Amino acid sequence: MRETAKYYEELHFYDNHTEISDSDQNLFLQLLEANDAVGLCGVFEEEGYPIYCMSNFALTSLGYSFDELMEKTGGYFINLVYEKDKDAFLQEYDGEMPKHREFRVIGKKGNYMWMSSHRQRMISADGRRLRMASIRVVDGIKRRENQLLAALSKEYRSILYLEEDGKKYRWIKKGGVLSDSHESGSYEEIFQALARYREIYVHPDDTAFTNLVEKVRNLPQGKINDGTRYVANYKMMTEREGCRWNELQVLFNGNSEMDTGHVIITFRDVDDETRRKLDENQLMANSLQKAKEIISLKNEFLSRMSHDMRTPLNGIIGMVEMANGNLENAFKVRECHDKIMLSCRNLVELINDILDMQSLTSGTVEFTEENFSLVDMIQDGFLDIRKQARESGVSYEVELEEFVHPYVRGSEKYIREIFATVLSNAVRYNKDGGSVRVMGRELSNGRAVSIYEFVIEDTGFGMSEEFVKRIFEPFEQEHNGARTEYQGSGLGMSIAKRIVEVLGGDISIESRLGEGTKVFLTLPLKTVKDMGAESLNGAKRLLAQEAADRRYPNGQVAAHRESLAGKKVLLAEDNEINMEIAKYILEDAGIIVSCAKNGQAAVKGFEDSAEGEIDFILMDILMPVMDGIEAAKTIRGLGREDAKTVPIIALSANALDADVKKTRMAGMNEHLTKPVEKDVLIGTLAEYLLRE
């Protein structure tokens, strides 16, 4: 039995309650012995449970002085109970009182700790009902139990428990089997067993297991904090499956300075999740490397684009200044104008390539389908490229076998772009006196879809084997160094490849440096019946060919001046310079122009005109007050017959397919992208005259 006086002297009383009988003192000692307690606590059975007394041992375990405890709780024990345990604590105190109870209290640092108590009722000297309880800190034990339960629930293969007090170990689970009969012993024995395990099962090149076991051996000497956790993945050798990844986890709890610590060591198979993580990490590393490569390519691309944009801009500005300085020399002025036009076309080509690449990469491109003659497009089209070949002394031949289905349905614009890119490269990078040959055949023909195969062969400079491998990558050019002339954006073949893929076809290249290149193209296309009866089709084709031949000045104006003379156009354009340019082109063809500076003014201009007076409407899209889309819809909705039939042609700097779709849905007949050249604009107006 303990000495009563010792514990009596250490009691702190609240509200001057200090009279304790001999029987009460004996009760205190019984409570202390029952719980192997470190302290005593007494509370009145009143609201909030006012504190009656508290021993030094109890205060020390909680981390408070008596004054600090009173300040923290206001003298009420309920304020010391952890918030999540208060309801259960109150219910228990209001009902039948069990002798033993575990609950959490708030420590001085705001953390909670588990307490164990044994309690008895008594009466104070002034007749108030009391509850006296022994207090013992069991936080380490509870946490240890929780850790073991968590370890068991995770299906660990083995769980080893090392107890610092006495330097002992015990297997809680071994080889997947839970049993109290597993061997136990001293620290030295278990570390010898772990060393044998390493020699037999751990891959010899793997040091993670050895390093962590050595760290465990030294844990008590390192004054490790409560909750310290270490994890190591190591390769375990098996007879049937080779090496499998395993996890060794070490969790330290307790106080190593006081020899009260313990270590829980767990083993489990983590092969599947580790390999998955390794694959993910490798994928991430590959993606990161790819991203770095793309960023590098884009930086190079932007550097080239800066060069290729500034070069034609410099040419435009310089030629304008040169022309202004030679106004008396008509030949020199005309020469400057031709070079300005060439620089402008290079700039437009560059911008179009960038926009096409953006649309195809983002997936926003929409392929509109239409019926057209595949044979006519290849046999008679691409007049610009043919002219370039003639000027370069390169022969240009087309050899097509007879197509069972010459007429197809698909995106003529994008199919034309594929051929134009390949043919342009074949001519541009050819030798003097070289040749370009286009061969094609209908590989297979079905009732709805046919497979068309083409080979475009040139005798040009060819490409290196290394460049052929990356020619379809964006921004790639074989010679990315200094260039003396515009050579394109490096996007053409990448765009062509993406278009072919969207269409479900295939494109590949064979090339030998210094000898030439072959491009193999396969396209599956929907077939349509013979369209020869549609006479307008031939006229439209002719106009398209003529409009494409932009190198011949005044081609369309000269051809259609007589038919267009006296026709009236309503021109909606908010930019004064663009309005001046369009008005000049139209009036040069003999067309009468009425101008409107916004969509609302265009609607009013049409409403104020006599029915049938306006032959065409040219509509800008982005305008103040009312935009071109809304203006077109409003005109189409007017209650007069010519509002439904008058050709409305969009003139817009918006060049994406989504923009074209918006203008078509608004009721517009055509979409011409700025900058619009004279032959294209006049050729389009003339096409609609032929439809009448």
Image (cartoon, helix red, strand yellow):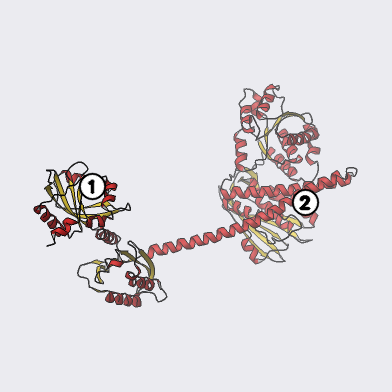
Q: Residue 111 at what x, y percent from top left?
A: 31, 53
Name the residue nearer the viewer: 680 or 166.
Answer: 166
Q: Residue 203 at what x, y percent from top left?
A: 39, 75
Question: Which label is found at residue 392?
Answer: none
Which of the 4 quarters of the picture holds residue 95?
top left
Q: Nearer the viewer, mark 1 or mark 2?
A: 1
Tell me which numbered mark, 1 or 2, is placed earlier along the sequence: 1
Considering the image in quadrants, where does the C terminus appear? top right
Instruction: Identify the element where label 2 is drawn.
Output: helix
103 left or right, relative to 223? left
In the displayed image of the protein, which residue is found farthest to the right?
Answer: 328
Q: Residue at x 64, y 27 (%)?
A: 635
Identify the amino acid type marked 1: Phe
Q: Is residue 667 visible?
A: no
Position of 578 relative to 240 (above/below): above
In the displayed image of the protein, which residue is found farthest to the left?
Answer: 23
Name the residue nearer the viewer: 192 or 290.
Answer: 192
Q: Residue 41 at what x, y percent from top left?
A: 19, 52
Which of the 4 quarters of the picture holds residue 59?
bottom left
Q: Is residue 173 visible?
A: yes
Q: Which residue is mark 1?
A: 77
Identify the amino acid type marked 2: Lys
Q: Residue 6 at what x, y percent from top left?
A: 17, 59
Q: How many marks overall?
A: 2
Name the residue nearer the viewer: 175 or 533.
Answer: 175
123 left or right, relative to 208? left
Q: Residues within 10 Å of mark 1 (few under 14, many from 20)?
A: many
Which of the 4 quarters of the picture holds residue 610?
top right
Q: Residue at x 81, y 38 (%)?
A: 558
Name the residue nearer the viewer: 254 or 526.
Answer: 254
Question: Which label is found at residue 387?
Answer: 2
